[in-house]
Image (cartoon, rainbow, N blue to C red):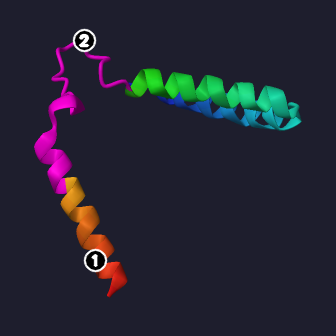
Amino acid sequence: MLKLSDKVRKIMIITEVLPTLKTLNRQDKIRAIQFLESEVAKEDSIFADNREHEFVSQTDAFEASRVLQKLIDERKANAIT
């Protein structure tokens, strides 16, 4: 758990970083966005807990394909009428 001084420091850091980000050229801003996106993705990774996860292949998902096709056909029929 963050102590109050840690929270204050994080706020100070972001208030220092934002003005600096504004001064970057377009290419460096994109690099910053890519860096932040990568960091967030690492934190949100569904595999971060190192547990086994079920992998479902769409190769044999015939029932799902039939259901999806039925929905598409129904929407097309409703759009025509």
Q: Which residues are magenta?
A: 45-67
Q: Residue 62, image x and y in percent?
A: 14, 41
Q: Is residue 14 visible?
A: yes
Asked if residue 47 lies in the magenta stretch, the reply is: yes
Residue type at numbered disc 1: Ala
Q: Residue 60, image x and y in percent?
A: 15, 32
- Could you tell whether 40 is left or right of 29 in the image? left
Q: Is residue 5 visible?
A: no
Residue at which label 1 appears: 77
Q: Nearer the viewer, residue 74 or 16?
A: 74
Residue at which label 2 appears: 50
Residue lying at 35% horizontally and 82% vertically, measured from the top left: 80
First in residue order: circle 1 vs circle 2: 2
Give the residue at the far bottom of this rendering: 81
Label 1: state its secondary structure. Answer: helix
Q: CA distance from mark 1 to mark 2?
A: 46 Å
Asked if residue 30 lies in the magenta stretch, the reply is: no
